[in-house]
Each structure stands twice: as C-alpha cells, then as structure tokens.
Image (cartoon, rainbow, N blue to C red):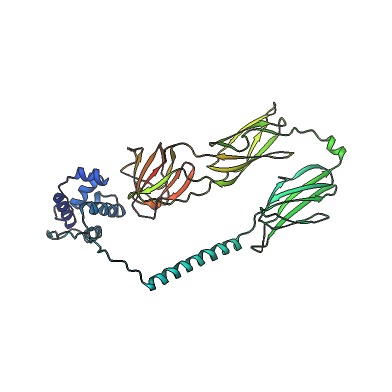
Amino acid sequence: MTNQVHKLGEVLRTAREAKGVDLSRVERDTKIRERYLSALERGEYRELPGAVYTKGFLRNYGAYLGLDPEYLIDLYRLEATSGTPDRPVSPAPPRPIAVRRSRTFVVTPAAVVGAILTLFVGTLIVVLGYQLFNFARMPELRVLEPAGDVAAHVGDTITVRGSTAPNARVTISGLRENPVVMADARGDFEVTVSLVPGSNVIELTAYDPVTDRDSDPVMRTVQVVGEAAASASPTLDPITLTQPEADATLGSPVSLAGTGTPGSTLEVTALLVSAAAPTFAVTDAGGSTVAVTPASPTPPPPATVGIDAAGAFAGSLDLGPGTWDVTVTPASGEPVIRRVIVQPAAGLGGTLRLEGGQSYLEIDQDGARVEDVSGSIAADGESVALNATRELRIRAGNAGAVRLTINGLSIGAMGSSGAVVEWRITRPAD
C-alpha cells in the first residue's frame, strides 16, 4: 500500500504543506499523535486504532486544515474498502467548507401565532406530564415512633408518630380499636392507640386523596408486659451518641461514637434527605456550559456496631454529599436520630470508568498531562483515578463508554457512543 498514491493522503499532505506546518506542529495543535497523522497521509490505515477513531481524527484534522471533514471521511471509506488502486490517481482539489449565507429574520403574524401555539402546547405537555407523574406515584409512609418493634412495653397505650403525603388519611388496623387520623399540611401525623396484654400487631396504611392511591402497609409489633415482668428484665442503659453532633457539617466518612449497654449491639442506618448540588462546572471544548444532572447518592446498607465491655462504641458511615438522617437503634430501647450535612471533598477528585467499550483518552489535571493515560486507548472495564485542585480536561474518543464520578457525585456518560467529546471541569476559587 505504501508504494501507491492515495488520494486522501495527497489531499491532507497538500493542504498541510499549503498551510506551512509540519506534523509536529499539527500534533501540538490538534492533540492527534504524529504517528497517526503520518499514517493518514501515507495511507497506512492498518497503523490506525480503528474506524471510529480514524473518523474522529479526520474530522479534527480536516477542520484544522480548512477542509470538509465529510469529504475526507468519504475518501477514507472508499480507500479502506476498495483496496489498493491499479494506478496512481491524481488528487482532486479539496472542497472548502461551505459557508452558510445569513438570512434576514422577518417576524410575521403567522410566526407570532405559531410561537404562541408552540409555547401553549409545550406548557400543556409539561403540566399534564407533572400531573400524570403525581397520579402514578404511590404515597410514602414512614413511621418514626416507634422506630421498630417493641419487645417490652409497659402500659396499655402507645403513641405512633410518622409522616406521609400532605393531608393523607392514615388508617390503623390489627388492634381492638382501629382509629383513623388525618395528616397535616406537611404530612405529619400522630395517634395514640390502645393495647392489650401480650403481642399487638399495628398495621398502618396511608391514603393520598390527590393520587387516589394507598401506600404500602407498615407494620409494628408491640409486646405489652406487666410491671413485674418489666422489673424482672435486665436494665439496659440508654445509648448516648456523642458523634456526630446534630446538624453538623462534615466530610465523609461520618464518624460514630457514644456509649450504651456493654456487650449489646446497635444498628446504624442512613436516609438521604436531599442531595448536594455540584460544586464544579462543566464546559465543552467551545466553552459552552454542559448541563449535568448527578445521580442521588445511594444510602449505605445497615451496619451493625458492637458496644465493648466498657460501654463504648465507635464506627463510621461512607455517605455521599448531601443532607442525611443517621439513625442509631439499640437492641431494645429508643433510637437516636441525628441530621448531618456531608460536604464534598476539596478540589476535584473522582474516577473515570470505561463501561460498554474502549475509548481513546486525553486527561490533563491542573494543566499537567497524565502521561500513562493520555494519547492511548483505555479498555472496557478500566478505571482511572482523577485528582486535581482547580481543573480537569478530559477528551474521549468514545464518549458513550466514559463515565465520570466527581467529588462523590456520579454524572454518568460524557456523551453518545462513538462521539468525540472534550470537557473542562473546573472548581471556582473559595
């Protein structure tokens, strides 16, 4: 193939020489390796990484030389599929990139009416979609007190507190008397129910009048014992939670510490109240803002923490950025709930992960090129650690396979499959 004249290579070489630049200069300006540029001009397509990347190289190189990228890609397809030509072919002059003529925009009555109708229809679709989403949503029912089953309760009544949809109707069943209570405008409710000696199974269901749907039932079992039985039971010390403090703002992992009954165990859970907003901005190669919607952090699974012989306990929870309710529940007794705010880490840290394919990568961290990764092709399943103070520059040859997690927030793929995408991720000065 090297002894034949290739039309694509001649077009590229002629345009480059007319521009007065060498391959080293082109590599610096386009970020395409010199050996790939040389292979394109020599027609040695076997030295290129693949059709997807070759087309991306041709688009960038063609735009740099002022040539029509689609014309170059057509030449590449023709030469790559038809084999070696029988005789040299004189290169045709490259087609210049077409410049679209500007047209004067004229506002007509028909255009105004069309814009109004479009705005009305769009608003109607949004409103109907919101209403359909609300009607399809099942109301959530949370019972805060008692937080779990009660093994030994003294008394013939117990107060149940919780939250659900605003103005929902909460029905109690399974008891001798089954009251119905209405939640307030915030969705909070409270009801005192009568109990009988022995086991009492309380079942609660919330009905939302807006969606006309019932929640999933929530069960609580309360074992009522007499005064003598209660006094014969071993005395359990109530737990004291010294860390974290209420409404504390801290980083992850969140430390847990306190005191309780020696030798017993605690269950620690976390519920996400609201996710944190990103502390970074994303722009594309042209400087335009890229809107990203990070996924909400996933709550960790319930953890079991043991209390030592001295009555002390310690542990930690890995929580993503956001506001969390941390609940520490003893084997017997009332749980302790602390709300904490987990802030993102300083700088720009995270992970780049390949899923569903390989991709050409270029990565700069605070202007420094990551040598082991940049300019090479990362395989499917490979991960790259990211760590910068102010700026990350990431260029991907197959954006659909490149997924990012920055400062604990998963922002998903950089683009569609096969697309060449460049992002600059920056963090504003404190």
Q: Residue at x 57, y 40 (%)?
A: 341
> For this rendering, which residue is in front, 147 or 375?
147
Residue 262 in which image quadrant: top right
Quadrant where the C terminus is found in the figure: top left
Q: Is residue 148 left or right of residue 127?
A: right
Residue found farthest to the top? 310
- Vertical side of 180 occupied by 409: above or below: above
Residue 361 in which image quadrant: top left
- Vertical side of 5 occupied by 340: above or below: above
In percent of width and height, residue 184 lies at: 70, 54
Q: Is residue 93 left or right of residue 317?
A: left
Q: Is residue 109 left or right of residue 127?
A: left
In percent of width and height, residue 88 lies at: 12, 58
How many numbered circles does the render carry? 0
Residue found farthest to the bottom? 110
> For this rendering, which residue is in front, 239 or 199?
239
> For this rendering, which residue is in front, 94 or 309?
94
Residue 181 in which image quadrant: bottom right
- Vertical side of 394 occupied by 99: above or below: below
In percent of width and height, residue 277 lies at: 50, 46
In percent of width and height, residue 98 lies at: 23, 61
